Image (spheres, rainbow, N blue to C red):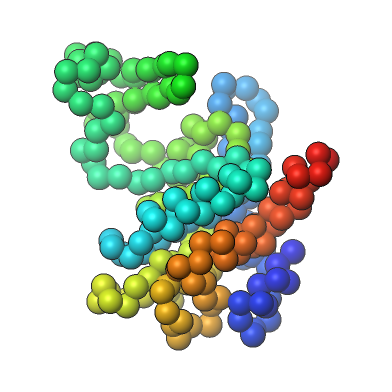
Amino acid sequence: CCNALSVFHNTEPVNFRDSFPEVWIIAAVQGHTHRRIEMKVIGFAGWSGSGKTTLVEQVIGLLEARGLAVSLIKHAHHEFEVDYPGKDSYRHRHAGCREVLVTSANRWAVMHELRGRPELKLSEALAQLSPCDLVLVEGFKHEPIPKIEVYRAEIGKPQLFPHDPHVIAIASDAPVASPLPWLNLNQPAAVAAFILDTLALGDKVAGETSGV
């Protein structure tokens, strides 16, 4: 499935399905039914200031434009807030609600308070998502999922690969010495194409486009 990887480097193509069975994570469909759906997963890892968020934002737009349903999981700091003092949802949550669901004609969101309970593992976070074709992950750097390392030498930090064996490609603003595929950080279309090829989503895109 991954022969096109040879375009990016001159080593033998790697079968990432064998190397990373976790890519094909089976997550529970929201609604607590017994149905299951296959959601493919890939992570983005890199030091702060490397350009992860900008690259992920661009890649999402390109993949959505190809007809894929894309979701994202981001690991945040302990004290992050999604609403602010004075809002009804904030008041209700701080009054003691374990969950507050806010809904409108455009979107809905659930805020769940852990109140001392363990934070979600990646597998548990995936199970909270609605069905989609692809989940992008920022954070959860110790999870055994395939990752694209986003790297800028000017930051002065070392590369994550080879210390993280789950890095499968490096996206940077200049070529780096590595046996892994190199992706130009300033060409998000190439990064999106790599994801489609690596996770065998090209057939999905072709099927959606042709109405299959």
In the displayed structure, would residue 173 be above or below residue 79?
below
Q: What x and y, as percent, mark residue 157?
A: 27, 74
Residue at figure coordinates x 45%, y 68% from the top left:
185
Taking the image as drawn, is residue 189 in sight?
Answer: yes
The quarter of the rendered structure image containing the C terminus is top right
Residue 208 is left or right of residue 28, and the answer is right
Residue at figure coordinates x 32%, y 37% from the top left:
118
Residue 2 sits in quarter: bottom right
Residue at figure coordinates x 67%, y 77% from the top left:
6
In the displayed structure, would residue 124 be above or below residue 175?
above
Residue 88 sits in quarter: top left
Q: What x and y, as percent, mark residue 129?
A: 51, 33
Q: Which of 52 and 98 is in front in this view?
A: 52
Q: What x and y, as percent, mark residue 55?
A: 43, 58
Q: Residue furthest left?
A: 85
Q: Which of 17 and 130 is in front in this view?
A: 130
Q: What x and y, as percent, mark residue 29?
A: 60, 29
In the displayed structure, would residue 72 be above or below residue 194?
above
The quarter of the rendered structure image containing the N terminus is bottom right
Residue 50 is left or right of residue 69, and the answer is left
Residue at figure coordinates x 34%, y 25% from the top left:
111
Residue 107 is left or right of residue 32, and the answer is left
In the displayed structure, would residue 165 be above or below residue 60?
below
Residue 177 sits in quarter: bottom left
Taking the image as drawn, is residue 166 in sight?
Answer: no
Q: Which of 69 and 19 is in front in this view?
A: 69
The mark total stands at: 0
